Amino acid sequence: MVYGSGTILDVNPAAFSDEHLSLEALGHQVLVCPGPGASRRCPLVEDGSCAIVDATDGVVFRLDLDDAYHREMLRCYRQELGEVGPLHVVVRPGQDRLHAALLDGLSVSVGDLGNLGAISSQVSMASAARHALTELADTGQRSTRRAAESI
């Protein structure tokens, strides 16, 4: 069996679920964000950044898209992750059609997380890419410093 790697942020008001445990069993670290509350707002929406999102390789988004603030959160997640980090959205029946424009191009499932193997693979690839890019950047910085020191 091939095990995954990388960190998944599960934006999920229900917190832990069987799917959460299954992703951990596949080798992923799973962080949970319960979403906004009466006294808690999303730092990605409010401040433009979130340390937890920065530390993840993929996001599972399970908030109710009938809520305007949740839709704004999804837009921010999409912008933050860009083309690099996988973003999977779990919607209630009918929301996939109602919010089709917002969901266009995203991985979407209705009711539950769906294909855990596909999500695991996407996150593992994103994690490997992040590590490779970090290594390349570190190598480039060391080379630049050595060149500067030799001048």
Image (cartoon, rainbow, N blue to C red):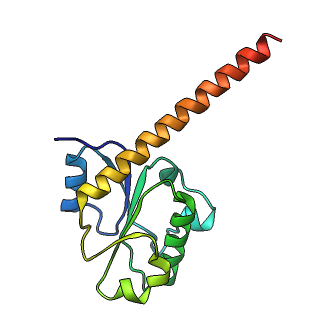
81 vs 129: above or below:
below
- Residue that extends furthest to the left in the rendered view of this protein: 1
Counting from the top left corner in percent of width and height, residue 34 is at 38, 65
Tell me which residue sits at (49%, 54%) in the image.
53
Residue 116 falls left or right of residue 10:
left
9 vs 94: above or below:
above
Tell me which residue sits at (34%, 66%) in the image.
12
103 vs 140: above or below:
below
Counting from the top left corner in percent of width and height, residue 80 is at 56, 59
Front in this rendered view, residue 13 or 114: 114
**Quarter of the image where the N terminus is located:** top left
Residue 27 falls left or right of residue 78:
left
Give the mark count: 0
**Quarter of the image where the C terminus is located:** top right
- Residue that extends furthest to the top in the rendered view of this protein: 150
Image-quadrant location for residue 143? top right
149 vs 104: above or below:
above
Image-quadrant location for residue 99? bottom left
- Residue that extends furthest to the right in the rendered view of this protein: 151
- Residue that extends furthest to the front in the rendered view of this protein: 105
Tell me which residue sits at (63%, 61%) in the image.
48
Counting from the top left corner in percent of width and height, residue 65 is at 42, 81
Front in this rendered view, residue 76 or 84: 84
